[in-house]
Image (cartoon, helix red, strand yellow):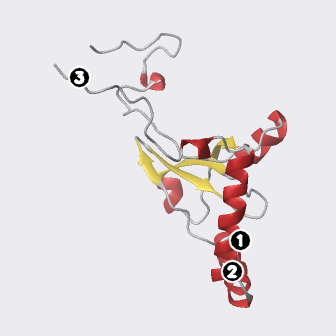
Amino acid sequence: MNDAPLVLNDDPYQWLEDVQGAEALAWVKAHNARTLTALGGPDFERDREAFRAILSASDKIPFVLKRGPYLYNLWQDTTNPRGLWRRTTIESYRSPSTDWDVLIDVDALGRNEGENWVWHGCTTLPPAQAFWASPNMHSVPKVRA
């Protein structure tokens, strides 16, 4: 039998999880100041603006993920800084003018709900397990043991 005491939390930085706490905010402010001292200046400002222009360009090639018959993309630009989670077909993606179906408008969602939403990605089930793959959309898919 193991007589070692149960340690519930040995993470010395757990206090940083209180993202609105005074101690965590002071720590972030101090580290931001240190970082800006080391990396800030005219080169930083110039590079930041150049990267912003590149990342918000309307002619950039969308990075896509294939899930089942669709290609998915989070599109961010000056009009949609939080992003549009959208999908299209392979045929449409290969065409001169891609037809995207917007699934989630993160900016509109935040405005409607009064929240500061940030896209953190999407996890999907394989098509055979997905709810929408069910022949009857109103039935609950069977859970496999």
In the current view of this chain or complex, which residue is farthest to the left? 1
Q: Residue at x 59, y 53 (%)?
A: 74
- Name the residue located 46 percent from the left edge and 11 percent from the top edge: 140
- Examine the image and state in which quarter residue 113 appears: top right
Q: State the quadrant of the N terminus.
A: top left
Q: Residues within 10 Å of mark 3 (few under 14, many from 20)?
A: few
Q: Is residue 23 left or right of residue 113?
A: left
Percent of width and height locating residue 24 = 67, 49
- Which picture quadrant has residue 101? top right
Q: In whole angstroms, how far apart are the C-alphas of marks 1 and 2?
A: 6 Å
Inter-mark Cα distance, 3 to 2: 49 Å
Q: Earlier in the sequence, mark 3 or mark 2?
A: 3
- Please determine whether, in this image, residue 20 is positioned above or below residue 2: below
The residue lying furthest to the bottom in this view is 42
> Label 2, on which residue?
37
Residue assigned mark 3:
3
Which amino acid, by three-letter code, is at mark 3?
Answer: Asp
Identify the residue at horizontal 76%, vertical 47% (top origin).
107
Mark 2 and mark 1 in contact (Cβ < 8 Å)? yes
Neighbourhood count class around disc 2 (C-alpha, 10 Å): few under 14, some 14–19, many 20 upward: few
Residue 108 vs residue 21, the one in the foreground:
21
Q: Classify the position of the C terminus by image quarter.
A: top left
Residue of label 1: 33
Q: Are marks 3 and 1 in contact (CB under 8 Å)?
A: no
> Label 3, label 1: how many angstroms apart (C-alpha)?
46 Å
Q: Earlier in the sequence, mark 3 or mark 1?
A: 3
Residue 14 x, y percent position in the rendering? 54, 42
